[in-house]
Image: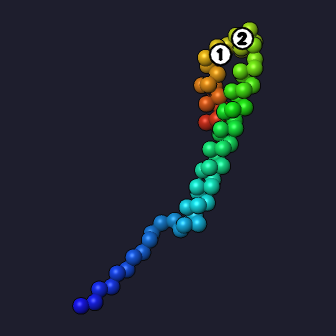
């Protein structure tokens, strides 16, 4: 008795999956860059200037995260 196996892959091709991965990694790198830039710039600001802007030093990571997520 002979068996025939028909395997079909439905979905994105391997090259499409790699393209999506590359795009995701590029977006992640861009978000990380925005986070680091925002964090570093706000960290350099004096406590007095931060207070004038209504920002406490403990808020800096959250602000940097929000800036990165807006990409």
Image quarter of residue 31: top right
Image quarter of residue 30: top right
Q: Mark 2 points at which residue?
A: 47
Q: Is residue 19 visible?
A: yes
Which comes sooner in the sequence, label 1 or label 2? 2
At mark 2, the secondary structure is helix
Q: Residues within 10 Å of mark 2 (few under 14, many from 20)?
A: some
Disc 1 to disc 2: CB gap under 8 Å: yes
The residue depicted at 71 percent of the width and 14 percent of the height is 50
Quarter of the figure that contains the N terminus = bottom left
* Residue 39 x, y percent position in the rendering: 69, 27
Mark seen at residue 57: 1
The residue depicted at 54 percent of the width and 66 percent of the height is 14
Q: Residues within 10 Å of mark 1 (few under 14, many from 20)?
A: some
At mark 1, the secondary structure is helix
Q: Using the image, determine if residue 65 lies above or below residue 22.
A: above
Q: Using the image, determine if residue 51 lies above or below residue 25.
A: above
* Residue 45 x, y percent position in the rendering: 75, 17
Image quarter of residue 33: top right
* Residue 43 x, y percent position in the rendering: 71, 21
């Amino acid at each position: 008795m002979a068996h025939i196996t028909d395997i079909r892959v439905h979905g994105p091709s391997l090259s499409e999956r790699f393209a999506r991965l590359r795009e995701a990694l590029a977006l992640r790198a861009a978000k990380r860059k925005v986070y680091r830039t925002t964090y570093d710039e706000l960290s350099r600001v004096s406590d007095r200037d931060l207070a004038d802007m209504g920002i406490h030093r403990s808020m800096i990571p959250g602000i940097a995260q929000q800036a990165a997520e807006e990409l």
